[in-house]
Amino acid sequence: MSIKKQINSEENCLVYFLRHGLTQDNLDRKYIGTRSNPGITDESKQLISERVAAGEVPEIKSLWVSPMRRAIETASLYFPDISPVVEDDVKERDFGIWDGQTWEQLKDIALYRSFIDSEGRVTPTEGEPYEAYVKRLDSILERIEQLMREEPENFPLAIVCHAGPVRYWTSKIFEEGEEYHNYFLPGAGCLAVEVSAADLRIDSVYDFYPETE
């Protein structure tokens, strides 16, 4: 798979998967789903503002954003002139009563150990079942495919969301063993995927902010 730098053409559609800027809870290694709703740190805001000032932000035509505060703040900083469509289906998983807790606090709970061993297929206590979580994420991929077929003029498309959804999507669209399979985006990071609108074939992929830690 070729790695290119920002490609836009009439034949291809470009999708940007962006993770929100980091929150203090992220830095504290806590599970943050849909029950906690923190904003991003001042450091993340400064990082994004510096990228915007330097012109290091992709040009887009459509913007889908998670309803969580951290995603909305990130989108408004990266794309202040684009009206976002708030998409409930791109939000992070509901981790139930585990939300706001760390691995250290949860590691002795049998259900949590099963959750880790099953790669998230076990439902957190009072949380969102895996089947419901992936169903809504699959619906987003289906909508992207439909949009490419019917309204390619609405690309490039940016989706500002969370690490979990991006890891799931990349596990679906890239084969196991490929560099970007099950990809973990850093805070405020961006993965760009160029897809052929004709046959939904992936033409290229690259980190928009590869230097981000």
Image (tube, rainbow, N blue to C red):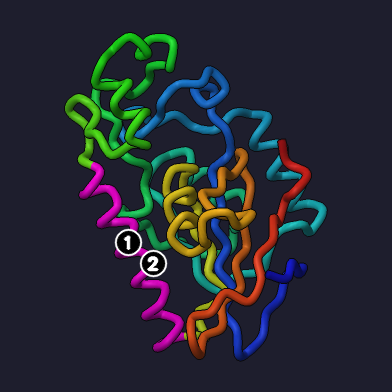
Badge 2 element: helix
Badge 1 element: helix
Residue 143, above or below 97:
below
Q: Residue under label 1, please give it.
A: 138
Report the front residue among 181 and 57: 181
Residue 210, above or below 150:
above
Q: Is residue 18 magenta?
A: no
Report the front residue among 88 and 127: 127
Q: Residue under label 2, please give it.
A: 141
Q: Which residues are magenta?
A: 130-151
x, y (%) of residue 50? 77, 44
Q: Report if the CB atoms under discs 1 and 2 are less than 8 Å apart.
A: yes
Q: Is residue 137 magenta?
A: yes
Residue 109, above or below 57:
above
Q: Amino acid at mark 1?
A: Asp
Residue placed at 20% from the left, 40% from the top? 129
Q: How many marks?
A: 2
Badge number at residue 191? none
Q: CA distance from mark 1 to mark 2?
A: 5 Å
